[in-house]
Amino acid sequence: MRRVVLAIHIGNTTAKFGFLTEGGCIMGRVSIHKGMTVDDAVIQLRQIADIKGVSGSVDEAVLSSVSPALTPLYAEAVEALYDVRPLVVGPGVKTGLNIKINDPSELGADLVCMSVGVLVKYPLPSVLIHVGNATTLSYLDAAGSFTGAIITAGLRRMLDSLVSSADLLNPVVLAPPAKLFGTDSAESIRSGILYGAAAMIDGLHARICDSHPVASTVMTGDFALTVQPYCHTQMIHDELLMFDGMAAILERHKRMTKTL
């Protein structure tokens, strides 16, 4: 019988599910909203499992969230479906990540899990680039400590802000630009957003490298594959980084619990 670990990350607008086995990870993503009920979450989980062909039971579960209101809702849904109480990444959970910022509680569970993923998978020191609702560049030093981050606007926010402030512009789809210089408004905006975001990431990464040693650079996030082709920086794309970090946290928690 294969062992299945369910990893769930609850973001601001979507929830991501990962069914992890020795053979790999089966992923799904759904939209979320503040008015959701436990039944909504149960239906989402069941439908994703059915659509992705994940049959049978789940042995363990781990959950991270940046939406406190929805955290207990999804935890209850996991218990209702699989009779498993998920480990919720948060205060009191020993992740193995030494967080060297002014207030470690400010670091979101998503960045904690992704950083742990870097620790267990890649050479240190490392730059972790997350391209999602916001774009962040975080630094993990040679000892595996999270020492700080640079946060700027995400691609979607840039696009929405630009289009919403111009009365004559129609909605623009964030698609690869056909060329550097656009010949209509939509093309010009796509070029500006994608080449601009790539140049910003390259520039910030170069500044980090000017003052910090870097052995690996890892990019992840919903828009990583959208912007990475336009970056000059050599980096590894890892869409499983968060789930792998969550699985590592779960294993560490189990080991520490057994020793108590």
Image: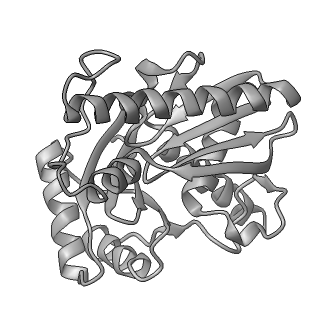
Question: In the rendered view, would you say 240 is above or below 179?
Answer: below
Q: Nearer the viewer, residue 161 or 65?
A: 161
Q: In this view, does 192 lie to the left or right of 176?
A: right
Question: In the rendered view, would you say 92 is above or below 217?
Answer: below
Quarter of the rendering containing residue 227? top left
Q: Nearer the viewer, residue 245 or 109?
A: 109
Q: How is the image coloured?
A: one colour
Does any portion of residue 213 appear in the rendered image?
Answer: no
- Which image quarter is the C terminus in? bottom right
- Which image quarter is the N terminus in? top left
**Number of marks:** 0
Q: Is residue 58 left or right of residue 149?
A: left
Q: Position of residue 207 (x, y in %)?
A: 76, 30
Q: Where is residue 247 in the image (x, y as percent from the top left)?
A: 53, 48
Q: Where is residue 26 in the image (x, y as percent from the top left)?
A: 30, 40
Q: Is residue 37 left or right of residue 3?
A: left
Question: In the rendered view, would you say 63 is above or below 49?
Answer: below
Q: Nearer the viewer, residue 134 or 9?
A: 134
Quarter of the rendering containing residue 221? top left
Q: Identify the residue at horizontal 48%, vertical 34% (top origin).
A: 197
Does any portion of residue 84 appear in the rendered image?
Answer: yes
Q: Nearer the viewer, residue 133 or 53?
A: 133
Q: Position of residue 4 (x, y in %)?
A: 37, 48
Q: Identify the residue at horizontal 59%, vertical 16% (top origin).
A: 234
Question: In the rendered view, would you say 164 is above or below 187?
Answer: below
Quarter of the rendering containing residue 233? top right
